[in-house]
Image (cartoon, rainbow, N blue to C red):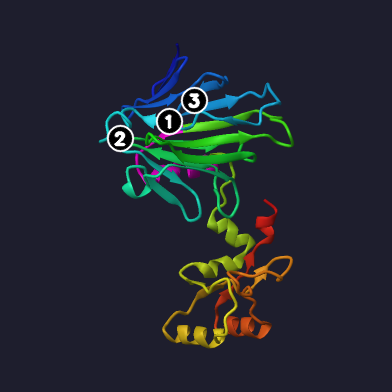
Amino acid sequence: MHQMNNDNIAISISENSIVITDKKRGVDWKLNGNGLLSFDYALRDDYIEVKYVCKDDNLQSVTMPSSFSPSGTYTDRSQSKKYLFPMRQGMLWDTNDSQFSQTFEFGYPGYSHDAFGMPFFAILGDKGGLLHIAETCDDCTWAISRSEDGKTHFDNIQNQSLGSMRYDRVIRIYFTDPTITAAKQYKKYVIEQGRFISFKEKIKTCPSMEKSFGALMCFIGYCQDDIDYVENFRRLKEYGFDRALVYPVRFNTYTLDFKMGGQPPVNLSDGEIDGIKELGYDVAPWTHIGEALF
């Protein structure tokens, strides 16, 4: 057995399991393993760094040590376990919810329409949370599953790049409070990395963004309709909405030769767009070019 300790964290690694301890909150997190792969563990002041050093290019993928459970989750059913992850507008999955008791297995590649916008997820127990950040996130898949015995898993699977593993893979594990505020640790991490851009900085490069604060967000749908868009927005302004962002008024894509639910995609005319702008409203397209590049 291998053990590491500092003032905040303890790690105990045996042949069949890994236990990491949040000393501040008094919570043990356990991960069962088969020992087929070796990982390097580094104990930092407030997080654990785990690295897979690329040694075998024949591997198709590597599952990083990520699907930890708070002690007692499956032996004591009074223990809860939730998953927090940044899919679409953000999701919180309570594994004790009887509505979601079926077995399943889903895989989501990062940075796509139906996947993750940011490379992190959190596991929330009764007394503490565990935030997982993928530092190497370009070739990873997020796998979510529930097995027949009711156990749930949330894994970071690192995939081959151009036919081989090619480079080392790294994750960070932080202890957090057991609430959705666990996501704030990711924001702190991004700031520390020098990658966070405040709204003040964004407005300097794109002054029109300032008009979006306090504006009504108007999603008008993907499909072109036969309604009078300008007249309806004129009525909206009469109701007292002086500022609004109207989208999508068009599709920013290579071709309009496609259907949205059997209907043509929304494609407002120049006159309609000018009429909406004359009301003091901003407009924006839906961009499929960016999604096609991921």
Magenta segment includes 24: no
Residue at the spot of label 3: 44
Residue at the front extreme of this rendering: 148
As measured in the structure, the alpha-carbon distance from the residue carrying label 3 to the one carrying label 2 is 22 Å
Q: Is residue 19 above or below residue 155?
A: above
Q: Name the spot of residue 183 as percent of width and height, x first.
A: 44, 44
Residue at the spot of label 2: 127
Q: Amino acid at mark 1?
A: Phe
Front residue (pair 282, 193): 282
Identify the element where label 2 is drawn. loop
Q: Name the spot of residue 219 as percent of width and height, x first.
A: 52, 71
Neighbours of disc 2 within 10 Å: few (<14), some (14-19), many (20+): some
Which residue occupies 66% across, 27% down? Answer: 59
Q: Amino acid at mark 3?
A: Arg
Q: Name the spot of residue 21 as percent of width and height, x first.
A: 38, 24
Identify the disc placed on residue 25. Answer: none
First in sequence, mark 1 or 3: give its number.
Answer: 3
Which residue occupies 43% across, 50% down? Answer: 91
Q: Quadrant of residue 281?
A: bottom right
Residue at the spot of label 1: 68
Q: Which residues are magenta?
A: 174-191
Left/right placement of residue 271 relative to residue 44 reads right
Which residue occupies 53% across, 74% down? Answer: 220
Mark nearer the viewer, 1 or 3: 1
Q: Are marks 1 and 2 in contact (CB under 8 Å)?
A: no
Identify the element where label 3 is drawn. loop
* Tag count: 3
Which residue occupies 68% across, 67% down? Answer: 252
Which part of the image, by quadrant, shows the N terminus? top left
